[in-house]
Amino acid sequence: MLDTYAVIAEPSRRRILDRLLQSDSSVTELAKDLGLSQPLISKHLRTLRESGLVRVRVEAQRRIYSLDAGPLAEIDEWLSAYRIKWNQHVDALAEHLDQRKISREGTTK
Amino acid sequence: MLDTYAVIAEPSRRRILDRLLQSDSSVTELAKDLGLSQPLISKHLRTLRESGLVRVRVEAQRRIYSLDAGPLAEIDEWLSAYRIKWNQHVDALAEHLDQRKISREGTTK
DNA sequence: TATTCATATAACCGTCAATTCATATATGGA
DNA sequence: TCCATATATGAATTGACGGTTATATGAATA
């Protein structure tokens, strides 16, 4: 089973969470809203369920998924040790982004 | 190239960052402290470098790595939308506990 | 009951990252 | 110059994960 860090490393799963932040949703509704296949959504929801980030309730044939942000607190705690630091390094960040931009300008992608 | 979420999804890389939070360090020192092989540390450091989370300076034969927490701000921002949710959860829990407390206050027990 | 809707899951494939081993590069010191 | 130290990197392996297709399960409905 994936830990919370690995779970939110996946962009589609973050989109699912962002969507559930707005309102609870069924699987089909999520698939339609995010433009992803139903099996893929179901798979991601399984991962999210197993990591405790979403919960399900059954309504007739539908499964309604809702957000549980609790597990994200662990990451927030880990980040807190770094929060003091990044203000000190704003200049370095800007410089780094410039470097990345320059790197990408030579690529086909 | 991995994005910041993927970079910190790797436990060893988080350990490297945690280590660098204490003090700057050479590759060999990191390898020794974390009990990982030198090539592995170098590879993780490359990833961390490319994502802007660490910087290097050369001191004789050594490369001294230091932390740059800047990119973590992106994750912190993403989390901020959820922060209110787990506070709600905590509030709800606290309220629930308060209710129980109030209930008990009427009883002889 | 037959059918349709909603969801989960199995089987499979391709990709990609983590890890190890061996080696290259570069610096400092004898 | 020769050797040791410090680090990076290439090659190869392995395993895990995202995504698709096809199918199973089960509930609602005509």
Image (cartoon, coloured by chain):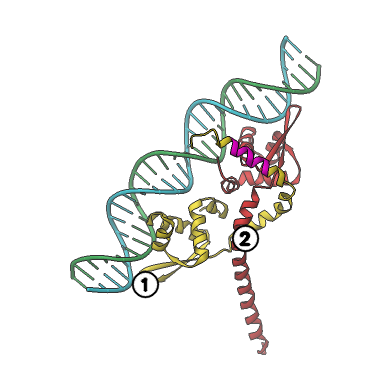
Chain colours: A yellow, B red, C green, D cyan
Disc 1, SS: loop
Chain letter of disc 2 in the image: B
Looking at the rendering, which quadrant does residue B45 occupy?
A: top right
Q: CA distance from mark 1 to mark 2?
A: 34 Å
How would you rate the neighbour count of disc 1 (Cα within 10 Å): few for under 14, some for 14-19, many for 20 or more? few
Chain letter for the residue marked with disc 1 in the picture: A
Q: Residue A57 appears in which quarter of the rendering? A: bottom left
Q: What's the residue at 62%, 66% (across, down)?
A: B84
Choose between D26 and C20: the one closer to the eye: D26
Q: Nearer the viewer, residue A1 or A48?
A: A48
Label 1 sits on residue: A60
Q: What residue is at 57 percent from the left and 52 percent from the top?
A: A5
What label does residue B80 carry, if any?
Answer: 2
Residue A10 within the magenta-colored segment of the rendering: no
Q: Which residues are magenta?
A: A94-102
User: Which residue lies at the image location 38% right of the left edge and 68% below the top edge?
Assistant: A62
Magenta run includes residue A96 = yes
Residue B35: x, y in percent?
66, 39
Q: Quadrant of residue A70?
A: bottom right
